[in-house]
Amino acid sequence: MFLPSSEEDIAPPIATAPPGAIVVAWENLNDLPKDAYVHVPHYDVELSAGDGTQWVEHADNSPLVFRAKWFAGRGLKPENCRALYVSGDSMQPELKDGDTVLIDTSSTTIRDDAVYALVYFDKLYIKRLFLLPGGGVELRSDNKHHPSREVHGADLAQLRILGEKVWRAG
């Protein structure tokens, strides 16, 4: 059995609240004040940060809980947001395999250099998008070891933007 010999041998706590903070424990989502918190559905779907994925099921589909002020401060509506998993390494360093992202399904108009969840030829992706001259779209990976894809012409009909990434955790 190990007994610490000094304060340096004692591991610090994993999580601490700032002095004076109020910490509220809850066991059920219904215990949270409805005007202060919102629930966002966490779908059992993996967005590929690589070569595309089909629907993949996960055991946990509990909603994510956010402060209502967080949404209000960003001009987001919780009913337009969905939480999804990231699969693969092509969006590293910003997004890592296993991360959870929040997408805003009301934001589907492409802005250069923003990250979007999308469907392309029936596969799910999460990529950084850029509009190309002549009406095309570049699907860019942040990881330089993964090539970008350019979508032009008739293939644009196979591209559907699901929503813009507005948050990540991992």
Image (cartoon, rainbow, N blue to C red):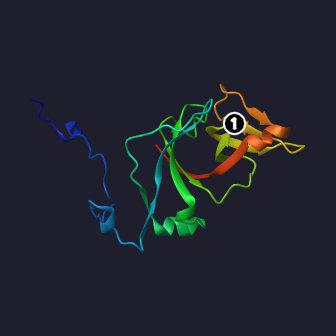
Residue 135 appears anywhere in the view: yes
Taking the image as shown, residue 142 lies to the left or right of residue 16, namely: right
Q: Nearer the viewer, residue 132 or 56?
A: 56
Q: Amino acid at mark 1?
A: Phe
Which residue is located at x 49 percent, y 69 percent? 69
| The one of 87 and 52 positioned closer to us in this rendering | 52
State left or right for residue 139 relative to residue 74: right
In x, y percent, where is residue 33? 36, 72
Q: In this orientation, does residue 152 appear? A: no
In the visual, does 126 lie left or right of 20? right
Residue 35 against residue 125 in the figure, above or below: below
Q: Could you tell me residue 133's position as x and y percent?
A: 88, 43
Which residue is located at x 32 percent, y 67 percent?
30
The residue most toward the bottom is: 35
Please name the residue that numbered disc 1 is placed on.
121
Give residue 145's position: percent from left, percent from top.
65, 25
**Which quarter of the picture shows residue 135?**
top right
Rendered view: 118 above or below 31: above
